[in-house]
Amino acid sequence: MQPYTFDPLQDSRWADFVASDPRASVFHQLGWLKALALTYGYRPLVLTSATPGEALSDGIVFCEVNSWITGKRLVSLPFADHAEPLVDDGADESGLTDWMRTQRNAHKWKYIEIRPLSWKMQPGTSLIASDSFWFHSLSLAPSTEQLFRGLHKSCIQRRIRRAEHEQLSYERGHSEELINDFYRLQLITRRRHGLLPQPRAWFQNLIACMSPNVDIRLARKDGKPIASILTLSHRGTVVYKYGCSDERFHHLGAMPFLFWKLIEESKEAGAEQIDFGRTDLDNAGLIEFKDRLGATRRQITYLRYPRSSQERGAVAKYLPWMRHIFSVLPDPLSSLAGRALYRHIG
């Protein structure tokens, strides 16, 4: 490809292209790019073979992460589980490689990262395999009854029945009250895992920029929020992106209950699949949970340029001892630290 670049927030061709290209996902949407720009200051650019003003037939969207902690880099796309390059497999890559080389040197980027879902580079490419994950998805082609039977009997079906027996209440939407309750559960969950919470502004901007393609689902026990999930949607795919819960109420089955609501409602709305996102290869508990929802999985691998850019970076390097600190921070300090540091992680 002979590369040209443009700002997708200023050029309507990108939104038109994403709406028509079957390979595009929710992470290609303008709403995701706007939320990244508003929350973290990332500015997107699209690389394409189309000349200025010409209708797009291909494109790779990136954001520059400019960090004094983790280094400058170009990522497609920050905080996205995947962002398929909207170019054909096996296309002439010499122009892409030349562009990466010249622009990396010009901007002093540590590396350029692409997060494909299915797209493959030709053998001998200048990109190198980076992090790998399991990607989980659930086809909604079977009937609702078949989908329920596909859930693990004791670990999922029984817990859904327990939640119904406990008369958990259920809400769906994106009101200010739901955002508040969701974020409080986020703080609880991130502390439990020794991780900083994403900035509250991130979730507010997602809802502002992506409505009506975003939903919060929340379960309560006697009026108290105990579990919540946030999902995004694009055409026939619903994406599970964030989940959080109060572990004191795990025995009530609220999370399986919410996931079944997600499956049921997505099926009723005519969605074709649920994207359950990526999972670290060593996260056995989460892998097992998604498997028990009936999801299938396959491995996906991120790609980086140049070939010398395999290091995991400052955040991953120091994560073990950082987790202990994060797990004991009070909520106000944890939220403040997340707001200050998350822009360096993308």
Image (spheres, rainbow, N blue to C red):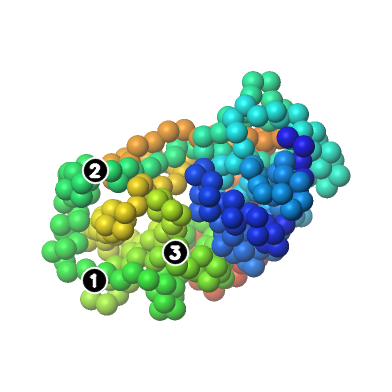
Residues packed near mark 3 inside 10 Å, few (<14), some (14 to 19) or many (20 plus): some
* Left or right: 33, with 279 as reference point: right
Q: Are marks 3 and 1 in contact (CB under 8 Å)?
A: no
Marks 1 and 2, how far apart at CA: 27 Å
Q: Residue at 59% of width from left, 51% of height from top?
A: 17
Which of disc 2 and disc 1 is earlier in sequence? 2
Relative to 172, residue 6 above or below: above
Q: Residue at 55% of width from left, 68% of height from top?
A: 209
Task: Determine which residue is flagged by label 1.
Answer: 169
Which of disc 2 and disc 3 is earlier in sequence? 2
**Camera-side residue: 214 or 42?**
214
Marks 3 and 1, how far apart at CA: 20 Å
Q: Farthest residue to the left: give it.
A: 165
Residue type, mark 2 in image: Pro
Residues packed near mark 1 inside 10 Å, few (<14), some (14 to 19) or many (20 plus): some
Task: Determine which residue is flagged by label 2.
Answer: 142
Residues packed near mark 2 inside 10 Å, few (<14), some (14 to 19) or many (20 plus): few
Closest to the camera, between mark 3 and mark 2, is: 2
What SS does tag 1 mark? strand
Q: Are marks 3 and 2 in contact (CB under 8 Å)?
A: no
Closest to the camera, between mark 1 and mark 2, is: 2
Q: Residue at 62% of width from left, 37% of height from top?
A: 87
Relative to 198, residue 272 above or below: above
In x, y percent, where is residue 83? 56, 45
Residue type, mark 1 in image: Ser
Task: Determine which residue is flagged by label 3.
Answer: 214
Note whether residue 162 is visible. Answer: yes
* Left or right: 288, with 88 as reference point: left
In x, y percent, where is residue 98? 80, 33
Task: Give the position of the N terminus as an image quadrant.
Answer: top right
Q: Residue at 68% of width from left, 21% of height from top?
A: 124
